[in-house]
Image (cartoon, rainbow, N blue to C red):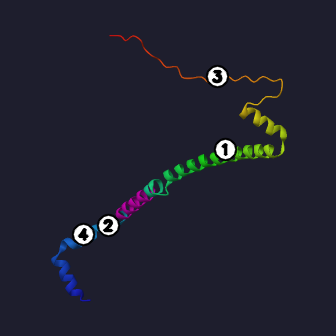
């Protein structure tokens, strides 16, 4: 490289020399600013990104709800399985089910059926004017 031409160029353009000195003197400030921007961007990514903390909390809440639903469905499944086993093998369970659903009664028994309640319709006969 031709050092004399470089020195002449710098002599003609003193502002480049001063700018270079300022950049060199403020390198710690620039590095600190760059690291601060990097940390802020990283923190934003950790909190708000697609797999950030907010999404993680939402997914964890959904996971808890699904576990509760699975537990409830397993219990319901166990109850239904027990009822099926009873209906397949226990004659008393079959009789009880027939009596409840078909309103059967043994000889000498009386079955009381309550009337179903119907919604009351409100018919106004007079109106305020």
Distance in Å between CA atoms under marks 1 and 4: 71 Å
Residue 19: which disc?
A: 4
Distance in Å between CA atoms under marks 2 and 4: 10 Å
Q: Position of residue 91 (x, y in %)?
A: 84, 40
Q: Nearer the viewer, residue 35 or 21?
A: 35
The quadrant of the picture occupied by the N terminus is: bottom left
> Which residue is identified by label 3?
115
Residue 25: which disc?
A: 2
> Judging from the image, what secondary structure is the residue with disc 1 in?
helix
Q: Nearer the viewer, mark 3 or mark 4?
A: 3
Q: Position of residue 34 (x, y in %)?
A: 37, 63
Mark 1 or mark 4: whose residue is earlier in sequence = 4
Mark 3 or mark 4: whose residue is earlier in sequence = 4
Left or right of 90 on screen, residue 123: left
The stretch in magenta equals 29-43
Mark 3 Cα shell of 10 Å, populated few (<14), some (14-19), many (≥20): few
Mark 3 or mark 2: whose residue is earlier in sequence = 2
Distance in Å between CA atoms under marks 3 and 2: 95 Å
Question: Contact, CB < 8 Å: mark 1 with mark 2?
Answer: no
Mark 1 or mark 3: whose residue is earlier in sequence = 1
């Amino acid at each position: 490289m031709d050092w004399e031409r470089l020195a002449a160029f710098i002599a003609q353009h003193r502002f480049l020399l001063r700018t270079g000195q300022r950049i060199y003197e403020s390198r710690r400030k620039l590095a600190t600013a760059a690291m601060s921007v990097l940390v802020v961007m990283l923190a934003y990514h950790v909190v708000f990104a697609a797999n950030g903390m907010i999404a993680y909390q939402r997914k964890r809440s959904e996971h808890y709800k699904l576990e509760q639903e699975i537990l409830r469905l397993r219990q319901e499944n166990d109850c239904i399985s027990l009822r099926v086993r009873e209906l397949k093998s226990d004659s008393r369970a079959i009789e009880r089910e027939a009596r409840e659903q078909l309103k059967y009664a043994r000889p000498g028994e009386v079955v009381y059926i309550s009337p179903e309640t119907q919604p009351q319709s409100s018919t106004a006969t007079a109106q305020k004017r």
